[in-house]
Image (spheres, rainbow, N blue to C red):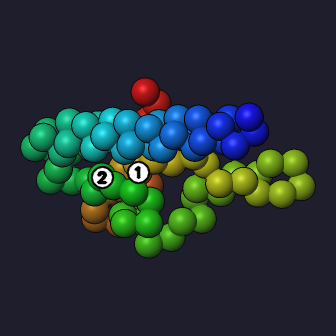
Amino acid sequence: MIGDEKEIIRKRQSRATKEGGAKEEDVKYLLIEDSVISKNFLIGKPSGVLKDKSPLYIPYGKEKAIIDADLCVVRKKDNRLVCVISVKK
């Protein structure tokens, strides 16, 4: 029974990951279609558009935690983070 439960959870998580990735792409292309946005901003995963990821870390008690950032909007002229998007189904 435990093995079956683990398999069900694994399949559900895999499906959610695939569906979430598709939604991220939808949001990304919706933004990129706007000529003003695409001219002035980069849109993508944090690792692909941010040179400095430190703005994604926020104080959390005595530690720092990273923001759940599926997509980031970064100004091209100075690589400044202007928006963080967490896509939900």
Per the image, the residue denoted by label 1 is 72
Give how far across and how far down residue 20 sits, in percent.
41, 38
Amino acid type, callout 1? Cys
In the picture as drawn, the residue positioned furthest to the top comes out as 89
Identified at 60% across, 42% down, the residue is: 7
In the picture as drawn, the residue positioned furthest to the front comes out as 1
Image quadrant of residue 63?
A: bottom right
Marks 2 and 1, how far apart in space? 6 Å
Give how far across and how far down residue 74 sits, in percent.
36, 55
Task: Judge from the rendering whether residue 22 lies leftward or rightward of residue 57; answer left or right.
Answer: left
Which quadrant is home to the N terminus?
A: top right
Residue 6 or residue 82, whichever sits in front: 6
Amino acid type, callout 2? Ile
Identified at 77% across, 51% down, the residue is: 59
Query: Which numbered marker is on residue 43?
Result: 2
Give how far across and how far down residue 61 sits, in percent.
87, 48
What crowding class fits label 1: few (fewer than 14 Cα within 10 Å), some (14-19), or many (20 or more)? many
